[in-house]
Each structure stands twice: as structure tokens, then as C-alpha cells.
Amino acid sequence: MKFIITVLASVSLTDYFVWWSSARLLRKHGVRRRYRLALHGFMAFQVCAQLFIILGRVRGWNVDVLLPMPLMIATFIWHLILAPIALGLNIVALAREAVYAALDYFRARKTAAARQVAPAAVPTPHASDPTEATPVPPGPVSEGQPSFLGVSRRQFLAASVALAPPTVTILSSALASQQIQNFRIRRLTVPLANLPGELDGLTIAHVSDTHVGRFSHGKVLRKITDATNALKADLVVVTGDIINDSLHWMPEAVDMLGRIDAPIYLCEGNHDLIVDPFEFRTQMKALPDRYLLVNETRTTLLRGLPVQILGLGWYGPDRHSDQTYRKEFSLERTTEYVMKMRNPELFQIMLAHHPHAWDHATEIPLTLSGHTHGGQIMLNEHLGAGPMMFRYWTGLYSREATKNTPQSALVVSNGAGNWFPLRIAAPAEILHLTLRRI
């Protein structure tokens, strides 16, 4: 609770500081009134929206429904990406002003001292002499010189610092509103050296990170289930983060899973357990032909051959409320616990929300994961948040056989839903996997 209060207080302080410093910057440099009013309107909305979300959570309201989707998108993009950038820009601008003020102060003192010691030998021109001109003290050149668009350089810089982050927020929110209902079908062939011949060509529909909630509900969930059914895969798996962060959305999540025309094997993700892990697990385990595996296994027949499905819980094996994957040690311990349940006589598939579990599942032929959202914000396939945060973040990874371990593969899904509305070079997806014996 203290952590949440600290985060909310920091977000509020950031909003107020950015509002004050940006408005001051525009006013000081004489930027036109309409731009100052636009800044005030944008910041007033952001502050009010955040207060409404906090109040709604305290009162138990489903603010995800009460606040219209476009406004929710703009609030999230601002507070999680652009507000920190705006904070940094304003701090730099204030620091720059302080440096220039200090330099002007010392220059003024130096000039005053020089005047005190300088000889008064230069005659003052007679006022009636038209040939003599009174010298004009130099002033700030940049302030009066237009750069482009009819504004001075300082006005342009001030407007950029103050107005660029809100402008980018509005533009990216428009982009997010267009893409949030879309996802792709990504088809991957997974070569496995130890795949039984009967399973050669086996297909898997891999759904992950639906995040049923504020940004993924209604129409997009029906599109996800229709697309999954259209794949007609031999096996359907869901690798965690089924809901986003509220049990308000469990009925829609249950409806989404119920519309899939096949048994489903699931593991849990961190977002599923934010509010009430026990209630989430209880409701999921009550669903017919939907098998939530929490540090447990289940055997199923695929093409007449028994296959063992292993599912990792997000919490460790000996804790129920606070053992998470924040430390690699807990992830390793959880994986080792589940690995003791494996049947070496059967082909095994592990469902692990966090892809780093693959490092500790060296004897499992195939591991399926999500969690990374493909990096969410990427410059291209290899540069961005994905590789900065994860060793494995999207697509197929393969590990060659060694003397002690067999060849194995990991597939990481970008996820079909969204907890954050904007994706760049990391599109939402459902994976269609085809296993091939090599």
C-alpha cells in the first residue's frame, strides 16, 4: 500500500510541476495566449482524469467503463511515457535558465567593477552636435530575431519544451485508438529433434496476454475467439494475463474462453493475481474443459499420443501471496519444483508466463510464454524495450542439444490484448505453431 501511495503521489507531483513550469516558460517568453490556454486545458484534463481514476478505485467503481476509451488512452500514454519526458525537459530548461542567470550576474558585477576603475577621459558628445550618435547598449539578439514561423528562437524552444509532450500524447493516442482493436495471426514452424513421429505437423493455437479489461473488451475479445477457432489447431493454450487488474472483468474473460471450441490449457500471469489470486484461481478452475495449471501438470491425448502439459504458477511453490518473479531465484525455484513432476516417457510442453523460465527448463522440449508484449515499444525487431528488459522477447528461440540436455525451443508471444494502449513495432498477435520433427 505504501508503494502504491508513493507512486500516485509521484505522478501527481509530476503533473503539477510540469503544469507550473511549462506555463511559466510560455508566459516568460511571450508565447501566444492560445497556446498557453491549450496547455492549461490539456494539463487540467490530465490532473482531473488521474484524480477520477484514484477516487474510482477507492470507491470501487469500474472506472475502465466510466471513463471513455480515448480519454483513458490519452491518460495512460501521458502518465507512463510523456509526463516523465516533459518533467526532464522542464528540469533542463530551468537548469539552463539558472546557469544563464548566474552568468549574467557575474558579467554585471564584472562590468560594474570595470566602470569604477576606468578613467573618465572620453568627452561626452555635445547634444547639439548632429554628427555624434549616442551609443545603444547591446541587447539579447536571439530574443528579437525571428527564426521561422514568425517567432524568436527562444519562443520556439520554450514552446517545444512545453507543448511537444502534450502534442505527441494526442497524436499517439489517436494512433493507439486505431490499432487497439487489431491483432495479427503469426505462423511459426517449430523444429524439434526429439518430437515423436506421431506429432509431426501438430498445430498449436497460442493465445497470451489478453488483458481483459480497460483496453481489451467487447468486440476485440470476440475477434480473438473467432480467429482462434478458425485456426482449428490440435491444441489451444493460453499463457497468462487473462485479465488485466480487476475482477470486474472476469465475466467477460470467462465468456471469451467459453467461446473457444476446444479444451484449453492455461497458466496464470502476474496481472491475473493483482487483486485476489484465490478468487481468480477458484473461478478459472471451475470452468469445464479449461485447465488452469498452477505449478501442476496434466496429460492429454494429441493424435492418439499422450502429451504432458506443465503449467507454472506466478507465485513460487511454497508461498501464496508475495513470491513473484522479481528475482531470478524465485523463477528458478518454481521451475525446478514443476520439473520434478515431468514424465520423461512422454513428450512435454511447458506453459510459463515469464519466458526466462526456459533457462531452467533445460529438459523440456517446448516452452510457450508471453509477458513481454514483444517489447511493446520497439524501434525495430532488435532495438527497443524488449531486449532491454528480457533475454527472450518475441518469436522462436532454439537451444542446441548438449551432452546432458536435449535440443529445445521457446516461443514467446507478443500477446493478443493490451494493458498499455500503444504498440510500436510489436503488434498484438495470436500464434499458430506447427511442430516439425528434424
Image (tube, rainbow, N blue to C red):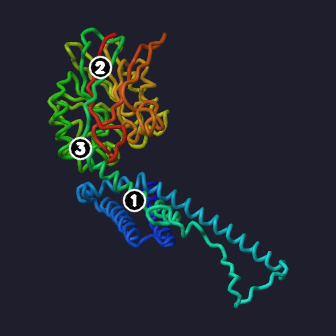
Q: The residue tagged with tag 2: helix, strand or loop?
A: strand
Mark closest to the chain's N terminus, 1 or 3: 1
**Are circles 2 and 3 on residues that touch, CB within 8 Å?**
no
Q: Which residue is mark 2?
A: 308
Using the image as rendered, state which of residue 146 and residue 369 is in the foreground: 146
The residue closer to the viewer here, 128 or 197, is: 128
Q: Is residue 216 above or below residue 21?
A: above
Q: CA distance from mark 1 to mark 3?
A: 24 Å
Q: Residues within 10 Å of mark 3 (few under 14, many from 20)?
A: many
Above or below: residue 103 compared with residue 325: below
Q: Say which element carries label 3.
A: loop
Mark-to-mark CA distance, 2 and 1: 51 Å
Residue ID at (27%, 55%): 70
Question: Between 86 and 140, which is closer to the camera in this rendering?
Answer: 140
Mark 2–mark 1 CB contact (< 8 Å): no
Query: x and y percent of residue 284 in the render?
Result: 24, 38
Q: Nearer the viewer, mark 2 or mark 1?
A: 1
Query: In the rendered image, which residue does mark 3 sit on?
Result: 181
**Residue at 45% across, 36% down:** 383
Q: At 25% from the left edge and 15% from the top edge, which residue is drawn?
A: 201
Q: Which mark is residue 166?
A: 1
Q: Residues within 10 Å of mark 2 (few under 14, many from 20)?
A: many
Q: Position of residue 69 (x, y in %)?
A: 25, 54
Q: Position of residue 204 (x, y in %)?
A: 25, 24
The mark lying in front, picked from 2 and 3, is 3
Query: Which badge, 2 or 3, comes first in the chain's sequence?
Result: 3
Quadrant occupied by the C terminus: top left
